Amino acid sequence: MAESFAVPLEKATEPFVLSVDVGSTGTRGGIFDAAGRPVAKTRIKADHAFRADASGRSVINPDQIVHEVAAVLDVVARRELAGRIAAVALDAFATSLVGVDEYGAAVGPCYTYADTRCVPQVEELRAVLEEGALQQRTGTRLHSFYQPARLCWIRRTDPDTFDIVRTWMSIGEYVQLQLLGARGAALPTAAWSGLLNRHTADWDDETLAAIGVGRERLAPVRGPHDPFTEIPHRVTKRWPALAGAAWFPAIPDGFASNLGPGAISGRLMTLSASASGAVRVMVPGVPAHVPSGLWCYRIDDGRSLVGGALNDVGHMVTWLDGFIAAPLKGTRDDWLAGPPAPDTPVVLPFLNGERSTGWRGDARAVAAEMSARTGAAAFFRGAMEGVAFTYRRVVEQLDDVAPGVQGVVAAGGITQTLPHWLSIMANVLHREMVPVPQKRTTLRGTALLALDVVAPDVPRAEPEVNEPIIPTPAWEAEYDRRYRRFLELYEDNFG
């Protein structure tokens, strides 16, 4: 986060929250004070990477994540903070899946959201479940991102493992099982799985019957504000500073990243751009209808989160960086500055399949309108414009669910490493972009949820924002033309 937003320990307001974020590239931890400000010099990160290959595999060792979280706690939960930490809050990359046996041990890897090997089971389930009705019940579509198809794939390809598993859970639940012996799926974690009935806030029996998983093989659903309070002695023995702290059930990083920049009402749309990306709006209650291209996640008793997600944002940047050399002078971000160029390639940016809005898990990247004159700068810009066009498809459907949104708050690492890309976003979306310069907004969002319980009366500090980025009217017509060509290319390949 911006250093001016952080507060020295001696000036921090108690009580504190120790926040942990298990992301796609590493596990981070830090202390936040009661005002929601990061406490300076308390943040740490342990790097990791998913194991992926051409088959569509994307996994990680679940016990590695447990060890990373414990190691983060070893550093952050310092003895001098004893009696000052009121809560431990955890978020983790969404839609992970770990199978656990009767002894509480992991059976096999943790499957991540990017594992696409279950794409064939998506089509099989479409013959069993009516997808439109499923989406209105669960808020999700049939897709390799969600657990119905993944569970069917495991049952089909590894029946012995499927039979050994007694409980299926997210990686955040697994961490808390190993550290605390606690079982329970936070409501938003259950919602992100594709197995929750958003109207009843409980597991969806019709979906479970279709995939052959009884509800006894899932943890009970609990509210995100309902902490675990019976903490084993071994925990406080290892981390004395956490004695008396409440541990909140793990939530998805997507929920946390919406809270971190301060977008907690339907007046603001949050755009996140990290390894993956999303556009989300918080709405009251349970919307009666979910547009076909979006998801709707029940997050607590009174709110839902509506939006759409992209697999490839930072993933696209990393891929491009791998074979496109940086300019001799300046940076790759310079290639994104200035007006659009008509000879820039049109790119469908699907390296790991598409989620919103077409839900094509089998979609792959396509580039068109290239010539011998197309250089590295033009290709880089075309790919990042393609990412912006994918966001626009989501925003157009969100406008139907949440009309009257006043602004777009943009956060995430890509908004800071490629600031000129936000100018492209402003012109593609035809609206102002408000950049949030904080780093690790997800970590802050996780802390804020716990602070609602342990420090409800302390006013929260407002996060810093940069000057809004205003669309340039002279550029919008060309971006609109290119967007229409993007839609035509999508229809030709995946329509």
Image (spheres, rainbow, N blue to C red):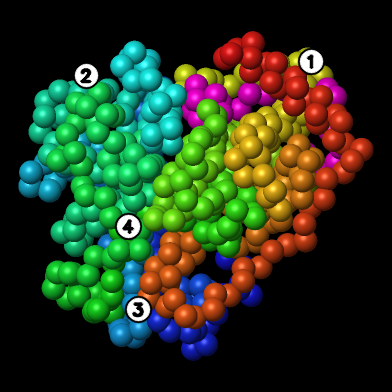
Q: Earlier in the sequence, mark 1 or mark 4?
A: 4
Q: Nearer the viewer, residue 451 or 156?
A: 451
Looking at the image, which residue is at 27% across and 29% down? 206
Residue 85 numbered tag: 3
Say which of marks 1 and 3 sits in front.
3
Q: CA distance from mark 4 to mark 3?
A: 21 Å
Query: Is residue 327 something that shows in the picture?
Result: no
Element on which disc 1 rests: loop
Residue 223 numbered tag: 4
- Residue 464 location in percent, x, y? 66, 68
| Magenta stretch bounds | 333-360
Q: Is residue 146 left or right of residue 159?
A: right
Q: Is residue 78 above or below residue 355?
A: below
- Residue 181 location in percent, x, y? 15, 59
Q: Is residue 424 left or right of residue 5?
A: right
Q: Amino acid at mark 4?
A: Gly
Contact between marks 2 and 4 (CB within 8 A): the answer is no
Q: Which residue is mark 2?
A: 156
Q: Is residue 227 above or below residue 351?
A: below
Callout 3 environment at 10 Å: few (<14), some (14 to 19), or many (20+)?
Answer: many
- Magenta segment's dominant SS is loop
Q: Is residue 175 above or below residue 88?
A: above
